[in-house]
Image (tube, rainbow, N blue to C red):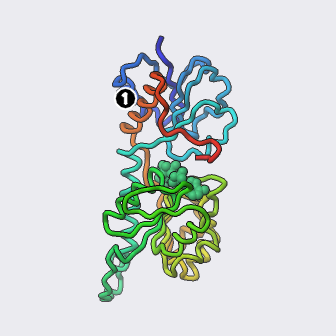
């Protein structure tokens, strides 16, 4: 009997995913049906985006797992009707690689002071060479799939990298801190700080007036994690005071960022529209298919969300 795989995401995504998901599922050699419309009590797996119309999983009585198309799970992890294993997206070829490129690019922009030369209407000739990477300590809050990959790329360029996670990590060339004291230690030394934490109750406002004040004066903040990691008023105050030289922000509490939000007009804020990285359809489809293969062969699912931790 075929297994039934329901695609439950924004309707626009189906046109993108239908072909690659078939290719990936064909490659694992199982008998399956894939579609967007199935009787709930016949569905074995849901390929899921939290903005899907499916919000109540109760009628899916034979569901084996929900497989997220996104890395972020904060919009679904607390859903009390989602009781089966819930896997998030880890897509090394697409999502992780894209994040490494975005983070590296924005880090180098600030490190090299590129803006002064790209926009120079007065043709100023200020021959201040930037420091080398070895003299620019970088901090990364969140040393998971994305944070550790970004840390390794920055380390390879010569930046001293210190990361912060919930549990101690052993990653070659990257120092790791944990706990409140560890957070303070990372902040104190980070001339460039990258936020790659998930959005959970414990990570909300990780950057606030107190923690921003710990950073070296004139530091840079780069946030491709989630908007709720930052107390926006505190960041704007720190920018106005020169404590933070510039913030490059990809994620916001409200998206799209409202037109009248002070970030848009602030001269020392760069807004990017949640494009730091995105799930790439062919590689993400292979990740989904691999988890279905695991489900069908009794192997443990990859990338399961820890409901208690919220990520
Ligand atoms: P991940 O593998 O789950 O890593 C999360 C990291 O944060 C882990 O190192 C974890 O510590 C740490 N952490 C979680 N809660 C913490 C706490 N309370 N204190 C200290 N450290 C904590 O997630 P990921 O795949 O790297 O993704 C990270 C986030 O990036 C996602 O949640 C999403 O919000 C964001 N994202 C953004 C985009 C974009 O386009 N802007 C794209 C993809 C993802 P442990 O290692 O000890 O568990």
Q: Is mark 1 within 8 Å of ligand 1?
A: no
The correct choice, above or below, for 277 with respect to 140 in the image is above
- Tell me the crowding category of disc 1: few under 14, some 14 to 19, or many 20 or more residues within 10 angstroms, Cα based: some
Count the marks: 1
- Seen at 42% across and 29% down, the residue is 289
- Seen at 51% across and 40% down, the residue is 88
Horizontal side of 92 relative to 38 (left or right) equals: left
The correct choice, above or below, for 310 with respect to 258 in the image is above
Please name whichever residue, 48 or 67, is drawn nearer the observer in this view of the structure: 67
Horizontal side of 246 relative to 229 (left or right) equals: left
Quickly name the residue at label 1.
24
Please name whichever residue, 238 or 272, is drawn nearer the observer in this view of the structure: 238
In the picture, residue 112 is in which quadrant? Answer: bottom left
Label 1: which secondary element:
helix
Can you give x and y, in whole percent of width and height, for residue 84 in the image?
61, 30
Q: Is residue 162 visible?
A: yes
In the picture, residue 280 is in which quadrant? Answer: top left
Can you give x and y, in whole percent of width and height, for residue 311 in the image?
58, 46
- Seen at 53% across and 38% down, the residue is 304
- Direction right: furthest residue: 80
Can you give x and y, in whole percent of width and height, for residue 199 in the image?
59, 53
Q: Is residue 10 visible?
A: no
């Amino acid at each position: 009997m075929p297994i039934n795989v329901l695609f439950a995401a924004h309707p626009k995504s189906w046109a993108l995913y239908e072909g690659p998901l078939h290719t990936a599922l064909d490659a694992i050699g199982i008998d399956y049906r894939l579609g967007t419309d199935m009787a709930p009590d016949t569905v074995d797996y849901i390929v899921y985006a939290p903005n899907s119309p499916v919000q109540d999983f109760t009628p899916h009585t034979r569901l084996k797992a929900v497989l997220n198309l996104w890395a972020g799970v904060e919009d679904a992890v607390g859903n009390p009707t989602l009781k089966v294993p819930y896997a998030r997206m880890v897509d090394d070829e697409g999502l992780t690689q894209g994040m490494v490129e975005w983070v590296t690019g924005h880090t180098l922009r600030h490190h090299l002071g590129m803006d002064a030369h790209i926009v120079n209407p007065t043709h100023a000739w200020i021959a201040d060479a930037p420091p080398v990477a070895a003299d620019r300590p970088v901090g990364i809050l969140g040393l998971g799939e994305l944070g550790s990959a970004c840390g390794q790329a920055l380390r390879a360029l010569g930046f001293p990298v210190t990361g912060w996670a919930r549990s101690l990590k052993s990653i070659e060339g990257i120092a790791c801190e944990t706990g409140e004291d560890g957070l303070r230690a990372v902040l104190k030394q980070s001339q460039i700080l990258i936020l790659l934490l998930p959005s959970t109750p414990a990570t909300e406002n990780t950057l606030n007036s107190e923690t921003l004040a710990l950073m070296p004066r004139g530091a840079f903040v780069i946030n491709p994690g989630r908007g709720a990691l930052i107390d926006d008023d505190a960041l704007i105050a720190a920018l106005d005071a020169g404590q933070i030289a510039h913030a490059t922000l990809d994620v916001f509490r409200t998206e799209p960022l409202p037109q009248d939000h002070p970030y848009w007009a602030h001269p020392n804020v760069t807004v990017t529209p949640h494009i730091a990285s995105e799930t790439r359809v062919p590689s993400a489809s292979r990740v989904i298919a691999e988890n279905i293969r695991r489900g069908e062969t009794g192997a443990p699912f990859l990338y399961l969300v820890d409901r208690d931790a919220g990520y």
